[in-house]
Amino acid sequence: MAVSDAYASAATYRSVIDKSDTGEDAEILTDLTAISRYIDRKVGRFFTTDASAVARVYQATEYSNQPTTLFIDDLVAVTSIKVDTDDDGSFSDESAWATTDYELLPRNAADGPEARPYTEIHIPSWSSKNLWGRHRVEVTATFGWPAVPSSIERATCHLAGILRLETPRATRQVNIGMETVVETSRQAQDIIAELVQAYGKRSLF
C-alpha cells in the first residue's frame, strides 16, 4: 500500500455500507482517499508505509529530561542512523551506528493483536554511544505503520458514507465540500474524536 493510498478499498466500503452496485467505485475511491488524508491531519500521522526507506532528519531537544531518547515519526524498520557530530550540516562524512548502539521503542511494538510502529530511538546502557546532544540526526527508515488498523479502515468507510449520504448516520444537506460536510456532522465528529483519542500523535517537540 502506497503512502498516498486510501485506507479502505471501494469493495470494502460497499461491504460496510451494504452497497452492491460497482458503477461508482472510482468516485467512491476518490472520496475514501480524501477522507483518509483528512484523518491523517486530524490524528497527526499516517497509517500506510513508505514503499522504500527514506531519510528524515531529527534533533533532540536541548533541555530534554530524556537525553538518551530521540523521538521520531512512526517507523517500521531502520536502515541506518547517522549523527552530524561535527555539526557541518552533512551526514556524508559520518559513519552509521551499529545496530547494537541503539534500541527501538516501544519494545515489542510489532507484536500483539494490533501491530504498532516504533516512535523512539533509545541509547541503551550497553551502547558505545553517549547522549544525543544537540546534533542533527539522520534516520533512514521505512516510515509508517505495519498495517492499517481495522478501526481506521472502518472509520474511513463510515465517514465516506456520511459524506456520500449513503448511511443512516448522514444528515441530509447540500454537499458543499468534504471537510464542511464532515465537520458539521455530529456523527462524523464523534468518530473523529474517538480516532484522535486512540491514535492521536503527540508532538515531537
Image (cartoon, grey):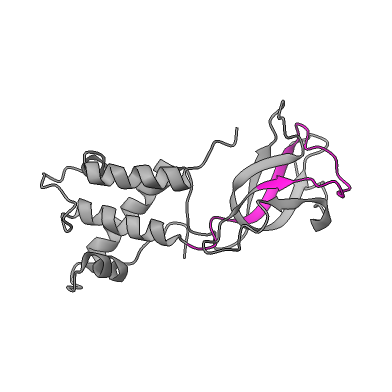
Q: Above or below — where is 155 with respect to 69?
A: below
- Pick the residue in front: 47 or 80: 47
Q: Is residue 6 visible?
A: no
Asked if the stretch drawn in magenta spans residue 159, the answer is no
**Rendered residue at 65%/41% (across/down):** 71
Residue 115 occupies which quadrant of the picture?
bottom right
Asked if the stretch drawn in magenta spans residue 140, the answer is yes
Of the 4 image quadrants, the one containing the C terminus is: top right
Q: Position of residue 190 (x, y in %)?
A: 30, 44
- Pick the residue in front: 151 or 138: 151
Q: Position of residue 8 (x, y in %)?
A: 36, 63
**Rendered residue at 71%/29% (across/down):** 64
Q: Taken as a whole, is the magenta stretch helix, strand or loop?
A: loop
Residue 68 occupies which quadrant of the picture?
top right
- Direction top: furthest residue: 63
Tell me the magenta residue range: 120-147
On the picture, is 124 further left or further right than 155? right
On the picture, is 48 further left or further right than 119? left
On the picture, is 91 further left or further right than 182? right
**Rendered residue at 34%/45% (across/down):** 192
Q: Is residue 184 visible?
A: yes
Q: Above or below — where is 142 with respect to 61?
A: below
- Pick the residue in front: 113 or 104: 113
Q: Position of residue 41 (x, y in %)?
A: 41, 43
Q: Position of residue 157 (x, y in %)?
A: 29, 59
**Rendered residue at 26%/70% (across/down):** 15
- Total labels: the figure holds 0
